[in-house]
Amino acid sequence: MTMNNDAIHFRFIEPLDVLHLRGNKLFGDPGSFGECLIPPWPSVAAGALRSAMLARDGVDLAAFAQGRVSHPLLGTPDAPGSFTVVGFTLARRLTCGQVESLHALPADLIAETDSRAHRAEAGTESLKLARLVPMTPVGGLSSSAPLAQWPVLPHAERKKPASGCWLTQAGWELYLDGQTPKGEHLVRTGELWQFDSRTGIGLDTGKRRAADGQLFTVQAVALRPDVGFLAAVLGAEPTAHGVLRFGGDGRGATICPIEHQASAINLVRIAQARRARIVLTTPGLFAGGWKLPGMGADQRLTWPGLSARVACAAVPRGEVISGWDMAARGPKPAECVAPVGSVYWLEDIDATPDALDKLAAQGLWFDSTDNRQRRAEGFNRFTFAAW
């Protein structure tokens, strides 16, 4: 995010119990397994924060769900107001009391075991980061990639990537500045959370007993102490203190306001260089599951105040989002999204720093009436990064 931090309200959400953060994989058959999604979609934070605001302001929840009453900042379920989630990520509280954001590795960063590094203790593992770079393929190679350049890891020998790594805020800022973070900027998932499997059984409401053959297992996540989520909201002031119903089964989580400085991007430098990377910070609802809005058949982008050419893209396997609509009491439509951390390299950028700042502030939404619910929930958010 590059917008004015004075207009953004930051909240640190810390769970009081294990959380059921369900993904979009169906389960329910005998012996099935319900996986947990970390971090959850930004809509999880949006729903929890909006519910708390409605309760705080004494709004009739049933009437609001039916669209019979509106909230001055939340609007109605069908016509959201100014409330917009503009950031949502994992975070942890430091010993100094400050909160730092933690980021999933972008698609152009690969964590590897550093075999040459000195190991202080036997059995410890030292990590380093390598970067994918756009390259024009040599003649004779063919693929389904639609862009002129491919993201390539320039290694002379094969190496096995390390999984389960997160980038600290300091490492994230180096990455956005065009530098390669070091191993010291990585945090392993074991330091942040652990999974806790829970066994459940279906109930036969007619016979008032356990249903036959409906034993299943669900995954819960137990975050380490001082680990939670950082939410950024624009257009409304969320509840400052209290307890939220967060995730599946409405598990408790505390909320508190924090002073947080979002990473600043040198947009003047990007405008002068005329090239940059776009990095998704929340899932992207795009045509074909990956194509940026405004991207034509010639791979050129045309946005308000910007034109550029998409030279390369690193987009992991697409994900499917849906969710449960509490107001409509039914599932939300299932939609394919580009995952968090997807990277797009732009060349021949024609834009002013002010235009770049405005684009980053509004997210990848260029029609004010386009999918207003998902826009308010925090999808299609991104940041520029140096290239």
Image (tube, rainbow, N blue to C red):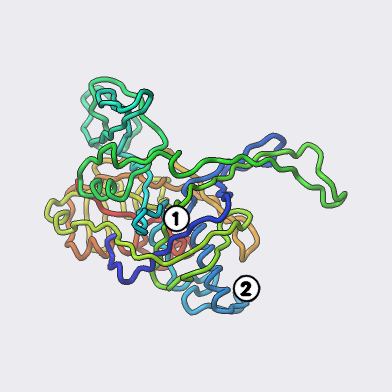
Q: Position of residue 228 (x, y in %)?
A: 46, 53
Task: Label 1: state its secondary structure.
Answer: strand
Q: Amino acid at mark 2?
A: Leu
Q: Residue at x 26, y 31 (%)?
A: 152
Q: Quadrant of residue 116?
A: top left
**Percent x, y of residue 193:** 48, 43
Measuring 30% from the left and 46% from the top, which residue is drawn there?
Answer: 297
Q: Amino acid at mark 1?
A: Phe
Q: Quadrant of the C terminus?
A: top left
Q: Secondary structure at mark 2?
A: helix
Q: Quadrant of residue 142?
A: top left
Of the pair 55 and 28, the residue shown nearer to us: 55
The residue under label 1 is 229
Q: Position of residue 214 (x, y in %)?
A: 75, 39
| Quarter of the figure with the N terminus | bottom left
Does residue 73 appear left or right of residue 6 in this picture? right
Residue at horizontal 71 percent and vertical 43 percent from the top: 200
- Near mark 2 (Cα within 10 A), the count class, few <14, some 14-19 or many ≥20, is some
Residue 309 visible within the image? no
Taking the image as shown, residue 148 lies to the left or right of residue 244, namely left
Whole-angstrom CA distance, mark 1 to mark 2, is 25 Å
Which residue lies at the image location 62% right of the left edge and 77% below the top edge?
Answer: 60
Q: Which residue is mark 2?
A: 61
